[in-house]
């Protein structure tokens, strides 16, 4: 075959059919006769399916074939009017192949120089086509005789010819096959605009991208000027065509003709450009969460407008594909930070529409969060709707008088539980918090606590913030998270995007091929510094000014780069946006100003009330503001949000400084006057008060000031229920500031209420300096004691929180004296006085569980206040003056029995039971009253129960009940107390659980995990006193298990104590120097415990001597007696001439004999072991042998595996001493098995080394 033109064509196909050789064929499917060229296409497809190459055909023949086939099948009638997507893709492949063939000629093959074609036409382009494949060669124009020197002029002539060919390919008409060049207008502007002929019709239907590409090739370079870009080589044309094929959904999209003909420039909302390396890190972090359940925190920082949010939003699709969800909250300087997290959850729950998904989620939340759901529902309304409130136990209500640390940590625990319930391997979540720089310290602390929570796994935490002076708190939080080994932190810092990314953005926006829009993108990048927000605003400004407009005749966006280059704009994005807004119509500017005063996000009903009387119509203006890119509508919520906080700021800057107060006051007043009901007023109270408060200085009428003061009280009260304590304090103080100077005389009730409310808010928010001033004001002006009690309660709590426990004790005793409940000073309290008080109280009591359930309630207001103050006093006395504690306990019991019972009575009875044992040594009586205290929750609220169970299990239950059982109760109490927010009691519960786990012989590996987790949480919530003792307990477990070299239990304390505490010696020094006797006692016992187990008997004896028993006897005192007694018997055998050792041992034996009578389970094996050691020390070998056996059997029967091992080890020592080696080995083997079961591998190693020696 010879192609037209003379040169042989190089084809890849095996079957070559020349033009005119094919015969007509019958289409069996359609029953019509098709031209031979269409049968050629059928053969082509068949050959492709058989693995053969396609058929060679000229471009002109191919175009004619396509026209005939479309006409016959009714798919085509006219130039590109109804080009379907598959047809356009086919034509695009032909265009790419043709352009590539010309590019190869221009670039030169195999190192040869480029050549000029000159006579490019449809007839001398030969296509090799198969299904999804197309290649092209140039035929008949590349002979040596036709070679012409290659230069710019000849290159551009070829490129113009290529433009006409591509126009024919995409147009589908083929009328330009002869390539008769038509006369061109001098410039694009000179083209006719009144009539739209065939070429204009093609423009309407052909994608703008291809229209721009083709017209840029056809238009002479002289006519272009500075209006558009121009191709410099065919290679660039090829690249742009390949880009269209690679991303057809972007570049070949069907642009709305209505938009273009009306000159509308649609800005993409969720577009993303550049940032490939940063995006890969974000996606890799998501992959770690999805595949391994490893929590990751990704933080993104950068200046405003750098695309931080756009970057992090890129995980939405892969997260959704994995069955996950995104929970997103945005902080705002006009919004209280601690409400943002709850608002994010509320939005998330409000978007759950799938019934099955909702049912599964509801079940997971119920199982994981438990009774805390009721409290969460109060802060998350949509969670209430999901959980169907009538099915939930909502009895647990927030106590406004809780300790600040309790309130804060309670919510941290609940949020962690909620995230844990929502997220699992099948439903991972991304928790995204935007604009962290607006967070306060308390919210950042909450975020950190949630991120490092050890129970959360399938969650990717995302945070973005600006790089400025306000980021210090955020960076401090991130540094703290980074030091935590359980969480991976990825920190990204964004700078301005590169020119290529700006070019991609403009190319997609204007549907201009990337090579053609480079001149424009270079100017835009230069003027905006690569800030994507600035670039978007600048382009919108150019469009609004007519510097970028759509030309109907050319079918593309038109601009003059030289004019844009000379355009002067501000260097600040906010100033530029503000200037752009000033060119808007006045009514639009008015709308934007009013909307700016309502915050970053606002209700459309709120805006409607705010614009009443302003001659502004929402129905006309809101769509305009949305289309202009200033506002965005939140679907299905009737709420509006600013497109960016910089746009919000720019709109606010439209209001002159000297008119901002009056503008806010007017808007707030309008909303207030237009609220038609109390419910509507309560809904918009924050918006009303926030605006009015800006203009407070303009309100001169005292009557109006009092009315606004009342509004601030309402807003503050609502803020308290919404957990916005700092914001609440500001509202209350604003209300106080509006009152008259003689307000305590003329408006006493409102004044007192505002001050009392402010005291609570200051205390919970931890603003103690302001609290002290507020308390002084109340105590100075309150009319009576009853009106001072709220201030007094805040005062003693403040003293306690500030670590001034002695002052708190003195002040509380003074207040109780004013209430009629006087106590002797601590120096006047004697053991005889305590004993007498206990006996008197005991003689007056005959209470049973039934009595508690039916006894009258305490109703006397002052007595209730007295009980409340005494319950707080109990906590202060335990750490400072325990000698007074029994007197307070007796008073609480007596007052309850005489005047009625309340919730605080339970703690009184529990403290009374503890005092009975320590003073009277009557375990039965003490246990009975402790059990009575557990009846009170049934009458006064189940939220009391976890706290009572905690202290009952820690101080009393072990006298009667198996310690393994009380250990489990402590763990459950810890969870319940954390859920209730009682951090101090929760820490006490987990501390005692870890201690009792050690004493009860629970698996050490499990105990170590619990200890490590508890240590993390103690450091996290700043429970430093408890963490000091706990770290020493943790060290015991690590040393017994042989892991002390792998883990450092004191590492988490280093930061809290400025690096001063690095080991147990540092803790001991700190505790001794600061008077923390309880910690000193705990460390001495722990060292006694380890010294004895590791056979360092001299050290054990020394630690036992240093241990100081306190008045209020804890469980550790019992075990001190055990190990001191065992150590004494060891020395009694080795130092027989020193009688003190036998005395110490027999004292311990006598104590355990008494205790054994109350609990065989807990104390029998220990008593028998001491007794065996006693017989051995006295030389009573037969009795010793029998008693060792009984002790081992008792330990096994009562599940004390560690003490079973100890009994076997001591028995082995006994047999070794009397020369029975076989029995000694037998018991050593049994001891080794017990220690292995316990997990004490260090003791196993010690036994092995002893055997070798």
Image (cartoon, rainbow, N blue to C red):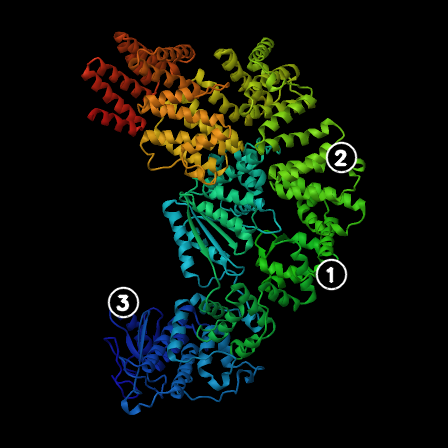
How packed is label 1: few (under 14 Cα within 10 Å), some, or many (20 or more)? few
Q: Quadrant of residue 827?
A: top right
The C terminus lies in quadrant? top left
| Residue in front for this viewpoint, 984 or 372 | 984
Q: Secondary structure at mark 2?
A: helix
Vertical placement of residue 34 versus 398, above or below: below
Determine the secondary structure under disc 1: loop
Residue at image x 45%, y 77%?
A: 213
Q: Is residue 853 above or below residue 729?
A: above
Q: Secondary structure at mark 3?
A: helix
Count of numbered circles in the view: 3
Q: Which residue is mark 3?
A: 49
Q: Which mark is residue 1048?
A: none
Position of residue 447 measured from the top left corner of the image (x, y, whole percent): 50, 44
Distance Cα–Cα, label 2 vs label 3: 92 Å
Q: Are marks 2 and 3 in contact (CB under 8 Å)?
A: no
Whether residue 751 is visible here, answered yes or no, is yes
Q: Are marks 1 and 3 in contact (CB under 8 Å)?
A: no
Where is the N terminus found, in terms of image quarters?
bottom left
Q: Position of residue 285 (x, y in %)?
A: 40, 51
N-terminal of the two: label 2 or label 3? Answer: 3
The residue pinned by badge 2 equals 749
Residue positioned 29% across, 27% down in the render = 1243
> Residue 256 at what x, y percent from top left?
53, 69
Badge 2 local density, few (<14 within 10 Å), some, or many (20+)?
A: few
Res 1089 → quadrant: top left
Left or right for 745, reference 1196 = right
Of residue 421 and residue 35, the one placed in the foreground of this image is: 421
**Residue farthest to the front?**
1137
- The residues tagged by marks 1 and 3 sit, at their Cα atoms, a distance apart of 70 Å
In the rendered image, which residue does mark 1 sit on?
615
As drawn, 235 above or below 635: below
């Amino acid at each position: 075959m010879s192609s037209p033109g003379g040169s042989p064509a190089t084809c890849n196909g095996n079957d070559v059919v020349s033009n005119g050789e094919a015969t007509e064929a019958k289409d069996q499917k359609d029953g019509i006769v098709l031209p031979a060229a269409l049968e050629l296409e059928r053969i082509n497809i068949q050959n492709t399916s058989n693995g053969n190459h396609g058929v060679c055909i000229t471009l002109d023949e191919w175009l004619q074939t396509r026209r005939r086939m479309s006409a016959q099948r009714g798919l085509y009638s006219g130039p590109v009017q109804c080009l379907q997507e598959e047809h356009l893709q086919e034509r695009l492949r032909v265009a790419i192949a043709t352009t590539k063939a010309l590019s190869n000629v221009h670039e030169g093959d195999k190192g040869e120089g480029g050549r000029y074609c000159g006579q490019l036409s449809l007839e001398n382009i030969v296509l090799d086509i198969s299904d999804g494949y197309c290649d092209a060669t140039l035929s008949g124009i590349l002979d040596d005789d036709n070679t012409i020197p290659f230069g710019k002029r000849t290159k551009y002539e070829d490129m113009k010819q290529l433009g006409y060919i591509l126009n024919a390919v995409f147009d589908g008409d083929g009328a330009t096959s002869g390539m008769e060049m038509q006369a061109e207008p001098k410039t694009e502007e000179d083209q006719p605009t009144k009539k739209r002929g065939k070429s204009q019709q093609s423009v309407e239907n052909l994608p703008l991208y291809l229209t721009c590409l083709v017209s840029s090739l056809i238009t002479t370079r002289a006519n272009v000027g500075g209006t558009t870009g121009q191709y410099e080589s065919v290679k660039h044309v090829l690249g742009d065509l390949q880009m269209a094929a690679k991303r057809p959904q972007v570049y070949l999209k069907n642009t709305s003709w209505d938009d273009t003909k009306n000159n509308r420039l649609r800005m993409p909302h969720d577009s993303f450009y550049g940032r490939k390396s940063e995006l890969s890190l974000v996606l890799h972090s998501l992959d770690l969460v999805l595949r391994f359940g490893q929590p990751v925190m990704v933080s993104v920082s950068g200046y405003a407008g750098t695309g931080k949010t756009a970057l992090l939003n890129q995980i939405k699709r892969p997260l959704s594909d994995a069955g996950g969800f995104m929970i997103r909250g945005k902080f705002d300087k006009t919004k209280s930070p601690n409400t943002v997290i709850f608002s994010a959850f509320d939005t998330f729950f409000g978007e759950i529409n799938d019934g099955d998904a909702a049912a599964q989620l509801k079940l997971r939340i119920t199982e994981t969060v438990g009774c805390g759901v009721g409290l969460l529902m109060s802060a998350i309304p949509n969670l209430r709707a999901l959980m169907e409130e009538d099915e939930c136990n909502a009895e647990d209500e927030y106590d406004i008088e809780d300790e600040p640390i309790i309130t804060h940590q309670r919510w941290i625990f609940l949020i962690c539980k909620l995230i844990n319930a929502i997220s699992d391997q099948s439903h991972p979540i991304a928790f995204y918090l935007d604009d962290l720089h607006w967070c306060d310290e308390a919210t950042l602390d909450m975020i950190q606590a949630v991120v490092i929570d050890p129970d959360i796994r399938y969650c990717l935490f995302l945070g973005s913030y600006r790089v400025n002076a306000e980021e210090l708190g955020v960076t401090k939080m991130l540094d703290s998270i980074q030091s935590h080994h359980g969480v991976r932190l990825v920190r990204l810092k964004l700078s301005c995007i590169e020119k290529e990314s700006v070019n991609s953005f403009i190319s997609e926006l204007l549907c201009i091929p990337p090579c053609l829009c480079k001149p424009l993108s270079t100017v835009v990048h230069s003027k905006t510094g690569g800030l994507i927000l600035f670039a978007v605003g600048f382009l919108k400004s150019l469009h609004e000014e007519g510097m970028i407009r759509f030309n109907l005749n050319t079918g593309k966006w038109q601009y003059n780069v030289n004019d844009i280059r000379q355009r002067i704009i501000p260097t600040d994005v906010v100033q530029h946006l503000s200037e752009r807004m000033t060119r808007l119509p006045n009514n639009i500017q008015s709308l934007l100003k009013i909307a700016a005063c309502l915050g970053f996000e606002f209700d459309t009903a709120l805006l409607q009330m705010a614009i009443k009387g302003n001659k502004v119509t929402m129905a006309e203006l809101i769509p305009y503001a949305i289309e202009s890119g200033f506002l965005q509508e939140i679907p299905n919520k009737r709420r509006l949000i600013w497109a960016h906080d910089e746009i919000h700021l720019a709109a606010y800057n439209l209001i002159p400084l000297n008119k901002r107060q009056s503008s806010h006051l007017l808007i707030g007043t309008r909303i207030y006057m237009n609220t038609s009901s109390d419910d509507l007023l309560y809904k918009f109270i924050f918006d009303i008060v926030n605006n009015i408060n800006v203009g407070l200085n303009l309100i001169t009428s005292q009557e109006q000031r009092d009315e606004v003061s009342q509004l601030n009280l309402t807003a503050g009260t609502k803020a308290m229920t919404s957990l916005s304590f700092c914001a609440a304090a500001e509202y209350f103080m604003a209300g106080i500031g509006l009152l008259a100077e003689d307000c305590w005389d003329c408006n006493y009730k409102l004044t007192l209420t505002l001050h009392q409310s402010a005291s609570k808010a200051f205390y919970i928010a931890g603003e103690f300096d302001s609290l002290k001033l507020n308390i002084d004001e109340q105590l100075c002006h309150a009319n009576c004691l009853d009106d001072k009690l709220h201030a007094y309660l805040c005062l003693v709590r403040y003293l306690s929180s500030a670590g001034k426990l002695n002052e708190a004790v003195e002040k509380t005793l003074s207040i109780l004296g004013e209430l009629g409940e006087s106590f002797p000073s601590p120096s006047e309290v004697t053991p005889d006085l305590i004993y007498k008080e206990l006996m008197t109280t005991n003689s007056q009591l005959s209470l049973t569980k039934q009595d508690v359930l039916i006894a009258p309630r305490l109703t006397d207001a002052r007595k209730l206040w007295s009980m409340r103050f005494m319950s707080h006093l109990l906590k202060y006395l335990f750490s400072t003056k325990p000698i007074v504690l029994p007197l307070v306990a007796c008073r609480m019991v007596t007052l309850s029995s005489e005047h009625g019972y309340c919730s605080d009575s339970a703690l009184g009875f529990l403290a009374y039971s503890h005092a009975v044992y320590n003073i009277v040594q009557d375990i039965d009586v003490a246990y009975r009253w402790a059990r009575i205290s557990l009846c009170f929750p049934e009458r006064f609220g189940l939220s009391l129960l976890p706290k009572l169970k905690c202290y009952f299990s820690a101080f009393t239950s072990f006298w009667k009940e198996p310690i393994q059982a009380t250990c489990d109760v402590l763990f459950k109490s810890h969870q319940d107390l954390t859920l209730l927010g009682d951090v101090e009691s929760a820490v006490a519960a987990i501390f005692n659980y870890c201690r009792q786990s050690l004493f009860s012989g629970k698996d050490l590996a499990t105990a170590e995990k619990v200890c490590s987790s508890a240590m993390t949480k103690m450091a996290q919530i700043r429970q430093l006193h408890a963490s000091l003792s706990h770290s020493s307990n943790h060290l015991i477990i690590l040393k017994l298990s042989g892991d002390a070299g792998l883990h450092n239990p004191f590492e988490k304390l280093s930061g809290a104590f400025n690096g001063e505490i690095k080991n147990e010696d540092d803790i001991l020094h700190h505790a001794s120097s600061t008077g923390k006797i309880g910690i000193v006692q705990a460390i001495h016992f722990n060292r006694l415990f380890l010294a004895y187990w590791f056979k360092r008997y001299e050290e054990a004896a020394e630690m036992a001597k240093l241990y100081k028993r306190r008045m209020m006897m804890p469980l550790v005192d019992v075990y001190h007696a055990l190990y001191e007694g065992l150590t004494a018997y060891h020395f009694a055998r080795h130092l027989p001439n020193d009688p003190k050792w036998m005395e110490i041992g027999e004292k311990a034996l006598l104590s355990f004999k008494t205790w054994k009578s109350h609990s065989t389970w807990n104390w029998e094996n220990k008593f028998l072991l001491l007794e065996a050691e006693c017989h051995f020390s006295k030389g009573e070998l037969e009795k010793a042998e029998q008693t060792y056996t009984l002790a081992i059997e008792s330990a096994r029967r009562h599940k004390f595996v560690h003490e079973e091992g100890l009994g076997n080890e001591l028995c082995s020592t006994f047999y070794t001493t009397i020369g029975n080696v076989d029995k000694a080995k037998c018991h050593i083997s049994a001891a080794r098995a017990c220690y292995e079961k316990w997990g004490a591998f260090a003791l196993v190693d010690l036994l092995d080394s002893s055997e070798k020696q």
